[in-house]
Image (cartoon, grey):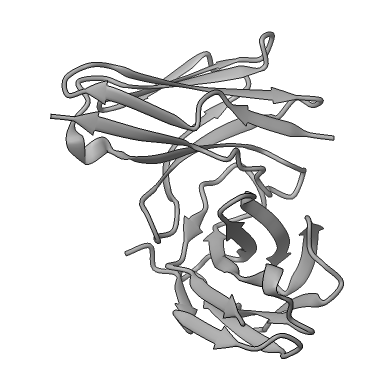
Amino acid sequence: DSGVTQTPKHLITATGQRVTLRCSPRSGDLSVYWYQQSLDQGLQFLIQYYNGEERAKGNILERFSAQQFPDLHSELNLSSLELGDSALYFCASSEGLAGKEQYFGPGTRLTVT
Amino acid sequence: SQKIEQNSEALNIQEGKTATLTCNYTNYSPAYLQWYRQDPGRGPVFLLLIRENEKEKRKERLKVTFDTTLKQSLFHITASQPADSATYLCAPLGGSQGNLIFGKGTKLSVKP
């Protein structure tokens, strides 16, 4: 158990809808990272927050947004969903900004029908 | 743009042998590189971190090397066991804020 929790575990929704994925980092970790993993693309970095502030952006679509709250949990919002958004979404946390290992949650499997 | 290549999608070896996985990166020079293990349907698990000024790092049966001239890292598992079967991901540092760029992984199968 990494200490990172993600909810829900599974999500099935229709195209055009909006969903919110939630992540609670390990106790004491200030950095939260979001990744998308699909079969053909591998693990793609989406966005990073550190102590409530956005710090780095990867291949995140404009339809997607995230935030980190004062209690350090984070939410990833996906809107106007398309079939191609079906994937595993992972959250990871680490102690600081760089030079530390990342601890991954169990993931949320999103299926868009 | 930054590019990470793990040399093979799959590697099959016999129990007891040494598995060697390769990671090549291009178009940048990461300050460090991490290796993760991922089992099907689960989140990656951190294994080792090696910095650019370190040539080699060991942890139990695992060894990682980092050649900044060749822009390559090698990951070795000695005395491999069927329980080592998993996908192994190479992840060099992607930016100054600590985000990583993951390779697509090498799926290792260790046969008894």
- Percent x, y for residue B67? 60, 13
Residue A29 is left or right of residue B14, and the answer is: right
- Give x and y (percent) for residue B77: 31, 24
**Residue B42 seen anywhere in this rendered image of the structure:** yes
Task: Classify the position of the N terminus of chain A by image quarter.
Answer: bottom left
| Quarter assignment of residue A31 | bottom right
Q: Quadrant of the C terminus of chain A?
A: bottom right
Left or right of A38, for residue B13? left
Identify the residue at horizontal 59%, vertical 58% (top origin). Answer: A38
Image point 66% across, 53% down: which residue? Answer: A44
Q: Quadrant of residue A47?
A: bottom right
Q: Residue at x 60, y 38 (%)?
A: B103
Frontmost residue, B104 versus A29: B104
Percent x, y of residue B62: 33, 26
| Residue situated furthest left in the rendering | B112
Left or right: where does residue A18 sit relative to residue B78?
Answer: right
Q: Is residue A24 above or below residue B13?
A: below
